[in-house]
Amino acid sequence: MRVVVQNDKTRVYRRDALRRRGGARQGGVARRGGLLRGSLAALAAAALVSGCAPGVGPAGSDVDPAAGQQQALHAPPARALDSYATKLRAEYAARVAAAKRWGLTKVPLAAPPPPRVKPRIHTRQGFEVDDHEELGLPPVFTRIPTDQKIVFLTIDDGAEKDPAFLRMMSDLHVPYTAFLSNDLIKNDYGYFKKMQARGVTLNNHTLHHPYLPGLSYARQKYEICDMQDIIAKQYGKRPTVFRPPFGNYNQDTLRAAQSCGIKYAPLWDEEVFVDHWEYREVDQDLHPGDIVLTHFRGRGDWKGTMPDMVRRFLKKVTDKGYAVARLEDYL
């Protein structure tokens, strides 16, 4: 207690003393609170190590956590990360085994996730028809605009129906896109249903695989739009992607395609066969976003099988550091 004399009057100030005593009490409470929090933290850490995090009852217990507790506490972060790493190792081991099983010397590279915002697709310069942009006709292109080292495999017509090819592509998880002509698939629609069940998109390649610029607008519309109807009937969905046979088209082709729901008309930059590659570009090389063409063919047309063609395709793209992506994910 401090006594102060002022103007002959004595004023007793207890305020300072009270403050000192109150501060001491508060400091003690703070110290005790700190110890308590430290103890609780130690207990929580021990609980995580032992697998008894809050919300987790005794072994075999059916007791649910109290309302508001996070369900994530049932799976401690370390355990979840370990489980994820185990899954990744198992997936890679399966890919290694599949590559070896199908005669590949390297494991195909995994494609990156598709973009959240899809790229804008424009008609390649020199591939336009009259009033292409003014009429809003489907773009004709040979490459997807991207800086990533990916290519897209597309397979035309449907003549060869090799079960080993389906197994190979499924085992290796290699995506591809099919362009089908009815004349070549009608003897076995079921083969392509199996393909579709494996995640492959089935697109339009006309009814009879004709040279379209030599036909009238009405005949071209019949070739394209009736194939739309057949794909919808057999496979449950009308395509929005169309490839003209031989890569030949004119304004009537694109107008007819547009009239029955086609939005894109991709061509290709490279073509792969069982024994060689062919290139559109003068540098004779792959580029990010290139579309690669091949055909459903076997020993009747090639000196090998479709799995032989896939091996040649995957060897080149993997050796050059490219992954194979799914075309529809970029359209």
Image (cartoon, helix red, strand yellow):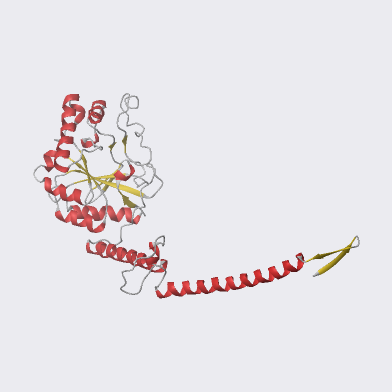
Q: Residue furthest front?
A: 9
Task: Tell me the quarter of the image containing the C terminus.
Answer: top left
Q: What residue appears at the point 43 percent right and 73 percent down from the top-left corner?
A: 47
Q: Position of residue 154 (x, y in %)?
A: 25, 45
Does residue 245 appear to the left or right of 6 in the view shown?
Answer: left
- Measuring from the top left, give residue 125's x and y in whole percent: 36, 32
Q: Nearer the viewer, residue 318 or 8?
A: 8
**Res. 246 image quadrant:** top left
Q: Is residue 194 visible?
A: yes
Q: How many marks?
A: 0
Left or right: 26, with 290 as reference point: right
In the displayed structure image, the side of residue 176 where residue 43 appears, left or right: right
Give the image quarter of residue 279.
top left
Looking at the picture, tell me which residue is in the foreground, 76 or 3.
3
Residue 294 falls left or right of residue 285? left
Q: Nearer the viewer, residue 245 or 21?
A: 21
Relative to 224, residue 93 above or below: below
Image coordinates of residue 239 in percent, x first then y, are: 23, 38
Q: Going by the picture, which residue comes out furthest to the left?
A: 187
Residue at 18%, 27% (x, y): give it. Answer: 214
Residue at x 21%, y 57% (from the top left corner): 168
Q: Vertically, is 207 above or below 58?
A: above
**Can you say which quadrant of the picture contains the N terminus?**
bottom right
List x then y, in percent, for residue 146. Answer: 39, 44
The part of the image, by quadrant, that contains residue 155 is top left
In the figure, 323 relative to 264: above or below?
A: below
